[in-house]
Amino acid sequence: MENNYYNPADLPKFGSITDLQPEMGKKFFSYYGEVFKEGALTEREKSLIALAVAHAVQCPYCIDAYTTDSLEKGADENQMMEAIHVAAAIKGGATLVHGVQMMNKLKEVSM
C-alpha cells in the first residue's frame, strides 16, 4: 500500500497549520497544550482518551501520534486496546440509539 491518501510524513507538518493563519493557529496550539497537561486526569489517561477518540473519528494521523504517545506515557497494549473497545462500544451504541429516532418517525408516518 505505497500510495494512500494519508502520508505518514505529513504528521510532523501539523505545526505548519499556523503558516496561513498564525493567530488562530497559536491559539489552537496553546489550548491543545493546556488540554494535555496533567490535571484531574493523568497525562497517560488523557493520551488513552485521545487514542480512543482518534479511532472513533478515524484519524490515522492521530492514531499514529497517540499510539506512540500512549506507549511513551506508560500505557500497555492491553490498556490501549481496551480504550479502543470503549470507543467502539460508544460509537456503536450512538448509532443504535439513533434507531429510536427512526422508530419514532416510523410510527409517525405509519399512523
Image: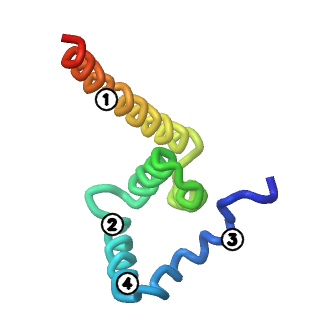
Of discs 4 and 2, which sits in the foreground? 4
Amino acid identity at mark 3? Ala
From the image, tell me which residue sits under label 1.
98
Residue in the image at 27% along x and 22% along y: 100
Of discs 4 and 1, which sits in the foreground? 1
Of discs 1 and 2, which sits in the foreground? 1
Amino acid identity at mark 2? Val
How far apart in space, not on screen, are marks 1 and 2 (Cα)? 30 Å
- Disc with the residue nearer the chain's start (4 vs 3): 3
What percent of the width, then of the height, locates residue 7? 68, 65
From the image, tell me which residue sits under label 4.
26
What percent of the width, then of the height, locates residue 21? 41, 86
Q: Are there few (<14), some (14-19), or many (20+) residues within 10 Å of tag 1?
A: few
How far apart in space, not on screen, are marks 4 and 3 (Cα)? 22 Å
- Disc with the residue nearer the chain's start (1 vs 3): 3
Q: Residue furthest top?
A: 111
From the image, tell me which residue sits under label 3.
9
- Disc with the residue nearer the chain's start (1 vs 2): 2
